[in-house]
Image (cartoon, rainbow, N blue to C red):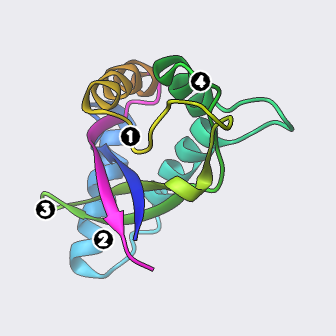
Amino acid sequence: MEDTLVLVLGPPPEGWQKDLFYKYQNDRRTGEASGEGNWEAFEGEIVSNLFGHDGESPSTMDELFSQLLGAPVRIEDPYFSMSPQRGLWVANIAISRSHVHVPEGSEATWPPSKKARDDVGLALMYLLKREWVNTLALYPERHTG
């Protein structure tokens, strides 16, 4: 079993993104693709922007966790998927302990403490506001295999 932090992105509050999100929800329910925009690709791009590295430079999420955990953190290969949460198909980002690199001897733990998760959720609320996406949940989980 591996300790994992799961980040769930929620529906956008307004704008064309909200329309695209609900069109995607309808497509998932009916099994028919409208062909108008691609919410999953939009969410994937947000995840790429948050976790993507430019060479050895830290990602946005590396910097955020480094600041909150008090140690340099590098997150590699978070797992992105779309799945139902609270009746809506939303983006899930699973960050397994084996994909989080911190210096040896660091006191940083993974998944982070409840306070650190709450702080990350608050910071993400502001970061993602520019993309008009909400953070729905941020919680630890234990995965097998």
Task: Return the residue found at the far left.
Answer: 86
Q: Disc 4 versus disc 1: distance between alpha carbons? A: 35 Å
Q: Residues within 10 Å of mark 1 (few under 14, many from 20)?
A: some
Q: Secondary structure at mark 2?
A: helix
Mark in the foreground, 4 or 2: 4
N-terminal of the pair, mark 4 or mark 3, is: 4
Residue on which the image places disc 4:
71
Which amino acid, mark 3?
Gly
N-terminal of the pair, mark 4 or mark 2, is: 2
| Disc on res. 27 | 2
N-terminal of the pair, mark 1 or mark 3, is: 1
Which amino acid, mark 4?
Ala
Counting from the top left corner in percent of width and height, residue 1 is at: 40, 71
Which amino acid, mark 2?
Asp
| Disc on res. 87 | 3
In this picture, which residue range is highlighted in magenta?
Answer: 130-145
Judged left or right of residue 90, residue 110 is right
